[in-house]
Amino acid sequence: MRLLLDDLGRLARRPATWVSYGLVVGLMVFVFVVIGATANSLPDRAGGGQAALSVLTFPGAYDSVLAFLIGIGTLLAVVYGAAVAGSEWNWGTLKNAIARGESRAGYVTALFGAVAVVLAVGLVVAMAIGVVAAAVGATMAGLSTTGLGDATYLGALPEKLARGWLGVAEAAAIGFAIATLARSQLAGIGVGIATYFGEQFSTIFFPDIVKFLPFHAAEAAVGLSQSGGVTVGNGGVQDAARLAPDVALVVVLCWLAGALVVGALVTRRAEITG
């Protein structure tokens, strides 16, 4: 617990934490407000334009916000996880901790635990901001917001957020493990980004295999509909090629656990000198 609290304090002061949140929230607010502001100028509001406006129609707009957060959030989580883990090697923080007598595995586990807590808080805050942005966009577009208080959807929202958090945490664990293997912040970020986009492009050729890979599984685990939402990240995967939400959740947990085990084993066996 002491290590976890110490790591949370360090992450709260890191520019990477605030830059990541700022990018997600800023881009999300921009997208929803622009859709609302340009709604009346759409050439075919009753046809194709209506499909664009569906992202602002509540209660479905909750899914639009969450889909956006999972889509862009998994990419930034990979970068964030790699930045945090890589800095331990580049800055000599891990070496100093080991010199104090800290357990290597315990130190790495606590550090990722802090990353997971930061992601959980960030997801909840970003979700709240996104809902406000979607409501503002709907008002600008002249759409009703009566579905904002839909009791059925709000009752299911906590579970969707929890599933989304596990997906984002899994992505961060992938970046965390890559940076630990490379023992470099820059290499971890670069390889993490390449892994993310490599998975997206491979959808074209191996749809039945890609659905088991980490980023597609993270999106499928939330159980969001692909119709009428914001197309972000893995939106090009057809429903037939997606895993069932509960199956995808198991796959996500396997990737998450595997990445953490790899990170802990590499750190435990690494020769740290200098």
Image: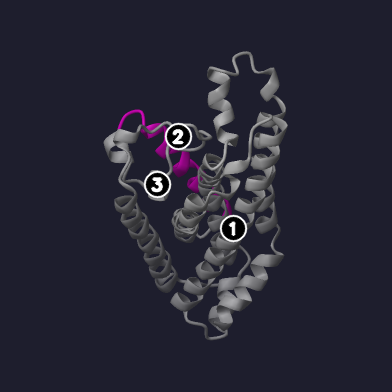
Magenta span: helix, strand or loop, mainly?
A: helix
Give the image location of residue 257, x and y in percent. 37, 63
**Residue 8 badge:** none
Q: In what quadrant of the picture does the C terminus appear? A: bottom right
Residue kind at label 2, given as amino acid type: Gly
Q: In the rendered structure, are the residues bearing label 1 and label 3 in contact, judged by CB atoms less than 8 Å apart?
A: no
Residue behind mark 3: 223
Which residue: 54% across, 43% down? Answer: 59
**From this viewpoint, is residue 13 visible?**
yes
- Quarter assignment of residue 97: bottom right
Q: Secondary structure at mark 2?
A: loop
In the image, is residue 53 part of the stretch drawn in magenta?
no
Residue kind at label 1, given as amino acid type: Val
Q: As drawn, is 115 to the left or to the right of 195?
A: right
Give the image location of residue 146, x and y in percent. 61, 42
**From this viewpoint, is residue 190 visible?**
no
Residue behind mark 2: 235
Tell me the mark number nearer the camera, choosing from 3 and 2.
3
The residue closer to the viewer here, 155 or 84, is 155
Q: Secondary structure at mark 1?
A: helix
> Mark 3 or mark 2, which has the lower sequence index?
3
Give the image location of residue 55, x and y in percent. 56, 34
Residue range highlighted in magenta: 185-206
**Disc 1 to disc 3, C-alpha distance:** 18 Å
